[in-house]
Amino acid sequence: MAQSFDVVVIGAGPAGYVAAIRAAQLGFSTACVDEWKNDKGEYALGGTCLNVGCIPSKALLESSENYERVARKFAAHGISVAGAKMDVRKMQARKDEIVARLTGGIQTLFRKNKVAWLKGHGRLSGAGAGGEGYRIEVSAGSGTETVVASHVVIATGSTARELPGVSVDNDVICDNVGALAFRETPKRLGVIGAGVIGLELGSVWRRLGARVTILEALPTFLAACDDAVSKEAWKIFTKEQGLDIRLGVKIGQIVRGKRGVKVQFEDGEGGKSLECDKLVVSVGRVPNTNKLGAEAAGLKIDDRGFIEVDAHCRTNLPRIYAVGDVVRGPMLAHKGMDEGVMVAEHIASQAGHVDLDIIPWVIYTAPEIAWVGKTEQQLKAEGTPYRSGQVPFLASGRALGQDETAGFVKVLADAKTDRVLGVHIVSSHASELIAEAVMAMEFRASSEDIARICHAHPSLSEVMHEAALAVDKRALHL
Ligand code: FAD
Ligand code: NAI
C-alpha cells in the first residue's frame, strides 16, 4: 500500500522547502521530494539557492570584497597592509562550510516540523486509487516508490540556459555551478551575459585579480533597471572597477583549446575574438519541467516551459500548485518562498497573496543595486504622471565615515496621489535599505509618509528620507 500524504512538494529549493514547512505547521501530513546531490554524492536540501546560487555566491562576494578592502580601500582610512594574500582554496572551503551548515539546517527544520524527506526524482504518475489523490513516483538508485498526495506543490526550480552548440563542462566552460567552484583565480575570465550572475561573479573574480571581459547581447546595460541606475552602475563597474563590458555583441563559435577557450564574436566594429582561461555562460535560466510527467498528467506548460498558474499559483489541475522559478514572475528566492507560504495557506483555506509588483531585486555588487516597483522609463511609457526625488550618498555623514559615498536613492511617486511607485538604490547596504521601500509600498505609503518618519542619524537610511523629501522639492541637505 502506497504511503499517502495531505501535501507532497516536489523540489526542496526555497520555494519548495518553505511550502513544506508551512504546510506541516498548518497540520498537514507533508512530504518533500528532492533529487539534488552535492559534490560528495550526498542528497542535499535547499536547491539552487543554497547549493549553487544565492548563498555560495554571497559568501564569495563577501570574501573577495574583504580582499579588495584590504588591498585597495583601507589605505584611505590610514591602514596599510603589506603583503596581503588571498587563499582561494580557503575562501572556497569557507563557502562550502556555509552551504553545508544551511542545507543541514533545513534537514533539522524538516525533522522539527515532521516533514518527510523523500530522496530521489519525483514524477507525477496519475491519479491515486478512487481518484482520491495524485500518485507520485520517487525514483532513486535504490529503486522506485510511489506515494499518494491529496495536494501537490511543484517547486522544481530552474537550471542555467545553455547556448546552442556550447557544451558546459564546469571546468573551463562553466555555468553557475562551475563558476562558484574555481580552485584558483583565472588570469583571464570571459563571461557571456552582463546580467545578475555575470556582474556578481565577474566582480568576485575581478577583485581577486582576474582580467574580466563580459560580452552582452543587448545594446543597453542593465536594461531592466531604472536608467539612472544603469548609467551610474556602468560608470562604476567599467571606469572605476575595470570590468570590460562589451554591449550589442553577437556570439559566434566557441572553441575549447588545450588551455582555455576562444570566443568569436561580433560587435559594432566587426568580428573579434576573446581568449580566456575560463568562460562563464550566464544567459538566463530555464524552468525544470521535463521528466516531471507533466504532459501525461495534462498539466499546462506555456511555450517558454513555465507551468501555467493563476495569481494563487493554482495550475489547471485541481489541487496541484506550482511555485518559484518554475512559474512566471522574477526568478528570485524570496518570491518563491512567499509563494510557498501562500499555497500552503491556500490549501488550509486561508487567505494568501503575493504581489508580484512589489518584489525587491538586489544585485550584490559593490556598491549594491536594489530596487522595487516601477522604473522612471516604465512610468513614462505607461503615461503615469510622477514626481521624482534623487539624493546622492555623497552628502551623507555615515557614508563619508564608511568611505562608501557612491550612488544614490531615487524615489518615484504618483504626481496626483503621492503614492510611492518605485524606489531605486545604488549604494553599499542597498539590500538592507530597500526593505523600507518595500514596506512603504506594501502599505501603499506616500512619499510624504516616508518623509515624516524619523530616521536614525547618522545612517544610510537618512538618504531615503532625503530622497522622499526631494520628491516635494524640500530636501534639507541637498
Ligand atoms: P530551486 O532552488 O532551483 O530548487 C528546485 C529543487 O527542485 C532542486 O533542489 C532540484 O533538485 C529539485 N528538483 C527539480 N526537479 C525535480 C524532480 N523532478 N524531482 C525531485 N526534485 C526535483 N535569488 C535571490 O533571490 N537572491 C540571490 O542573491 C540569488 N543569487 C543567485 C545566484 C546564482 C549564482 C543563481 C544561479 C541564482 C541566484 N538566485 C538568487 C536565484 C535563486 O537561486 C532562485 O530564484 C531560487 O533558487 C528558486 O527557488 P526554487 O525553489 O523555485 O527552485
Ligand atoms: P539574467 O537574465 O540576469 O542575465 C542574462 C544576460 O545575458 C542578459 O543581460 C541577456 O541579455 C544576456 N544574454 C542572453 N543571451 C545572450 C547571448 N546569446 N549572448 C550574450 N548575452 C546574452 O540571467 P543570469 O545572470 O543568468 O541569472 C539568472 C537569474 O538568476 C537572474 O535573472 C535572477 O533571476 C537570478 N539571480 C539572482 C541574483 C540576485 O538576486 N542577486 C543573483 C544571480 C542570479
Image (cartoon, rainbow, N blue to C red):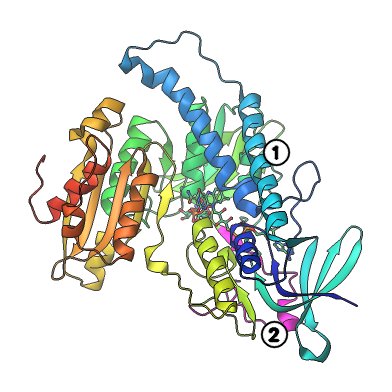
Query: Is the residue 311 above or below the residue 399 in the image?
Result: below
Mark yes or no: residue 106 visible.
Answer: yes
In the picture, residue 411 is in which quadrant? bottom left
Q: Report the image quarter containing ligand 1.
A: bottom right
Is residue 302 shown in magenta?
yes
Local secondary structure at mark 1: loop
Instruction: Residue at 57% x, 34% y: name it.
Output: 275
Q: Which residue bears the numbered disc 1?
A: 171
Instruction: Residue at 63% x, 69% y: name it.
Output: 23
Instruction: Residue at 37% x, 36% y: name it.
Output: 238
> Viewer-nearest of labels 1 and 2?
2
CA neighbours of label 2 inside 10 A, class few (<14), some (14 to 19), many (20+): few
Query: Is the residue 191 above or below the residue 359 in the image?
Result: above
**Magenta residues, start to end:** 285-311
Quarter of the N terminus within the rendering = bottom right
Q: Amino acid under label 1?
A: Asp
Image coordinates of residue 338 in percent, x first then y, are 51, 64
Q: Does ligand 1 reach within 8 Å of label 2's beta carbon?
A: no
CA neighbours of label 1 inside 10 A, class few (<14), some (14 to 19), many (20+): some
Q: Is residue 475 left or right of residue 370?
A: left
Judge by depth and name the residue closer to the eye, 447 or 473. Answer: 447
Quarter of the C terminus within the rendering = top left
Mark 1 to mark 2: distance in Å?
39 Å
Assign the magenta stretch its main secondary structure.
Answer: loop
Q: Which residue bears the numbered disc 2?
A: 298
Is residue 381 shown in magenta?
no
Mark yes or no: residue 226 visible.
Answer: no
Image coordinates of residue 154 in percent, x first then y, are 65, 70
Local secondary structure at mark 2: loop
